Every structure is written in C-alpha cells, then in structure tokens.
Amino acid sequence: MVVPAMGVISEIMSVFSRKRIFGYAFIACSSVCIAIIAFIVWGHHMFTSGQSDLLNAIFSLLTMSVAIPSAIKIFNWLATMYKGSIVLETPMLYAMGFIWLFTIGGLTGVYLAALSIDMHVHDTYFIVAHFHYVMVGSMMFGLLAGMNYWWPKMFGKMYHERMGQIAAVVVFLGFNLTFFIQFIAGSQGMPRRYADYPPEFAVYHFWSTIGSYILGIGMLMILYNWVHSLLKGETAPANPWGSNSLEWHTVSP
C-alpha cells in the first residue's frame, strides 16, 4: 500500500531539490523488491500464535529483509536532497515528513521482526504506533504531498501557500505526539484493544489525546485551505513548481 506513496515522494523530492532523482534504477528496483517481499511476511503477525520455531525464524528473516530496499529508498531520497537547491514549499514539507515517519516506522519494524523483542511487545501499543507510522502516517503524508503538488494541475486554482506550510507543520507535530508516545506506553506494557488501563498509563493516553486534537486541527486547516482555493483562490500559474515532467507542460486543469 505504501509503494504508490513512495512514487509520489520520488517525484516531489526531485522537483523541489532541483535535481534528478539519485539512483533511479535502485529506486525502481527497490519498489519491486518491497512489493514482492511484502507478500511473504504475513507470518510475523503470528509469532505468539504457536506456529513452529522454524516458521518464526523464516518470517523473522523475511521481515528484516524488507528493511534493505526500504533503506535504499531513504538513502536515495536524502542523496537527492544533498547539495540540492531545496525549496520548502508545502508538498516538499509533506515529503520530508514522509521520510521521517517511514524511517521511524521502518526502524521499529526491525525491532518487531526480532523474536526476542516481539514476544514482549506483541499486542501492545508498540504495535499500534508502528502500524500507524508505516501504514497511516506514511500513506497520509504521501497522499497530502501528492494532493498539494498536483492540486493546481487538477483544479487550476492555487491554495494559500503559507497556510499550507503551517498546516503541514501542525499535522506533523500532531501525528508524532499522538503516536510516538505510544511506543513508550507499549514498551512499558500497555496492551492494545483494552477499554480501561492502570493509572500509570494515564499520562501516555493524555498526551496522545492532546496530539490527536492537534492532528485534527491540522487536517481541518488543510480542508479549509483547499475549499477556499476552489471558491476564491487565484488562478494557478501554468507551472507553479518549475517542474519539467510532462503534465506541467499541458493546460491546467
């Protein structure tokens, strides 16, 4: 599910770094590798189910192997930014946020692939946080990066750039406050899918809830900015980002 978002990030990184994507062949091949390996790692959800030690070891190794093509992408994106003429427009802020979220999600995935750790944090909030960093945060930031990038092309209207930048920062801070704290709660033994919990976990839930409100405010800012652009926004320039890809050389929308 995250592979399409990675394609969006590769496009945006190149445009807003004013450089060709670093290692295009490796970027493309790593996408194929992630897609293939992702089909055969399902057993890592069953480490505590009683499946055989051999299967546990095999799925542990396969799960860890996903980190290799994922790390190649992170390295290539950072190398694309290196010594580039970086422009911190709204799509680029979301793309940079994607790198952070996917890196945190990927690194914690390596922890969970290790049987000695997964046995202790399985079915805790550590799993919830990891899942949201990879499958929610990364996907969401990839979507928002792409929507803000192609918005002028799709509708011929330009949203308010400063509000878009502020919203990107608010969403980033809100998401990390909501879910990073859950890594700590999970490592301390807070189980998931429980309606109640011991008092010592209250502080983690409190700050996670505060983060969710901040995240919600950021999403409302994004929605307002988009709706306002459609109703009262200025006509978008033909190529607002200075991109050289094909779609920006045609009429918008």
Image (cartoon, grey):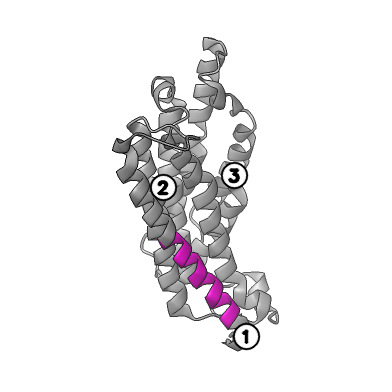
5 in relation to 29, above or below: below
Mark 2: give few (<14), some (14-19) or many (20+) Cα within 10 Å: many
Which numbered dot is residue 31? 3
Residue 109 in the image: state x and y as whole percent. Answer: 45, 35
**On the rendered structure, is 188 left or right of 163?**
left
Q: Are marks 2 and 3 in contact (CB under 8 Å)?
A: no
Element at label 3: helix
Q: Earlier in the sequence, mark 1 or mark 2?
A: 2
Can the viewer see residue 122? yes
**On the rendered structure, is 98 left or right of 45?**
left
**On the rendered structure, is 85 left or right of 67?**
left
Badge 1 is on which residue? 231
Can the viewer see residue 89? no
Which numbered dot is residue 248? none
The CA span between labels 1 and 3 is 38 Å
| Foreground disc of the pair 1, 3 | 1
Callout 2 amino acid: Phe
Callout 1 amino acid: Leu
Extent of the magenta region: 214-228
Which quarter of the picture shows residue 245?
bottom right
Residue 101 in the image: state x and y as whole percent. Answer: 43, 50
Badge 2 is on which residue? 179
Q: Residue at x 43, y 31 (%)?
A: 191
148 in relation to 64, above or below: below
- Residue 97 on the magenta segment: no
